[in-house]
């Protein structure tokens, strides 16, 4: 199981967080790929469609919308979808606990902390920690070190 990329953007398609773990092997540059992902996901009716969509010959998208933000993971086609959906949810829960009811502005003005959360959970495209309590404890320690 490996994550190719993690992407967070708002309803207008403005990227708020992005981390590429595997090189972008598809045609076009990074901005084109992000625009394709945005068009694909934002056009879906989230109440009637699933949170999984095939993106390329090797990648599928697992995504979830929380308020005005989309959280997207690009994963291998053979990987188990629900696992990644649960990790997106855990990521948002940890952000919410760490920031205290997280919103888009928290991510914009404290992006380095949001990346710190991401790096504690995911490293090199692999899931590192799945315990919310452990993550909150580690992040609190790192935050105090600043």
Image: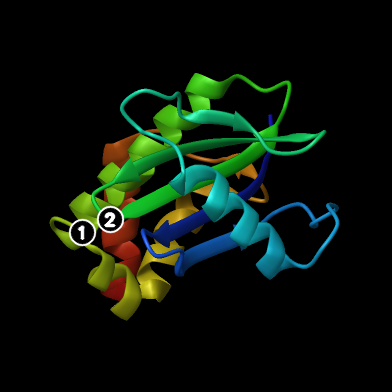
Q: Residue 132: image x %, image y %?
A: 30, 38
Q: Quadrant of the C terminus?
A: bottom left
Residue at x-position 44% and y-position 37%: 44
Q: Secondary structure at mark 2?
A: loop
Q: Residue 97: image x %, image y %?
A: 19, 51
Q: Is residue 49 visible?
A: yes
Q: Relative to 35, is 129 above or below?
A: above
Mark 2 burial class by Cα count in 10 Å: few <14, some 14-19, many 20+: few
Residue at x-position 47% and y-position 38%: 63
Q: Quadrant of the N terminus?
A: top right
Cα distance in 3D space between marks 2 and 1: 11 Å
**In terms of depth relative to the viewer, which is nearer, 115 or 41?**
41
Residue at x-position 43% and y-position 48%: 71
Mark 1 burial class by Cα count in 10 Å: few <14, some 14-19, many 20+: some
Q: Which residue is mark 1?
A: 102
Q: Relative to 54, is 96 above or below?
A: below
Tell me if label 2 and label 1 are in contact, CB under 8 Å: no
Mark 2 or mark 1: which is in front? Answer: 2
Q: Which residue is mark 2?
A: 68
Q: How is the image coloured?
A: rainbow
Q: Earlier in the sequence, mark 2 or mark 1?
A: 2
Q: Residue 54: image x %, image y %?
A: 67, 31
Q: Residue 83: image x %, image y %?
A: 50, 23
Residue at x-position 39% and y-position 73%: 111
Number of marks in picture:
2
Label drawn at residue 137: none
Please indicate whether residue 57 sits to the left or right of residue 114 in the image: right
Q: Is residue 146 visible?
A: no
**In terms of depth relative to the viewer, which is nearer, 51 or 16?**
51
Please indicate whether residue 35 sits to the left or right of residue 9 in the image: right
Q: Quadrant of residue 46?
A: top left
Q: Secondary structure at mark 1?
A: loop
């Amino acid at each position: 199981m490996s994550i190719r990329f993690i992407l967070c953007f708002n309803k207008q398609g403005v990227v708020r967080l992005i981390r590429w773990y595997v090189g972008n092997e598809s045609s076009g540059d990074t901005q084109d790929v992000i625009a394709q992902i945005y068009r694909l996901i934002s056009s879906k009716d989230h109440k009637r469609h699933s949170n999984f969509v095939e993106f390329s010959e090797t990648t599928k998208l697992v995504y979830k919308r929380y308020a005005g933000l989309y959280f997207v993971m690009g994963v291998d086609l053979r990987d188990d979808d629900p696992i990644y959906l649960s990790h997106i949810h855990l990521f948002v829960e940890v952000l919410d606990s760490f920031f205290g009811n997280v919103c888009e502005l928290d991510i914009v003005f404290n992006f380095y902390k949001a990346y710190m959360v991401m790096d504690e959970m995911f490293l090199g495209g692999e899931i590192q920690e799945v315990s919310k309590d452990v993550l909150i404890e580690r992040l609190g320690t790192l935050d105090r070190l600043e």
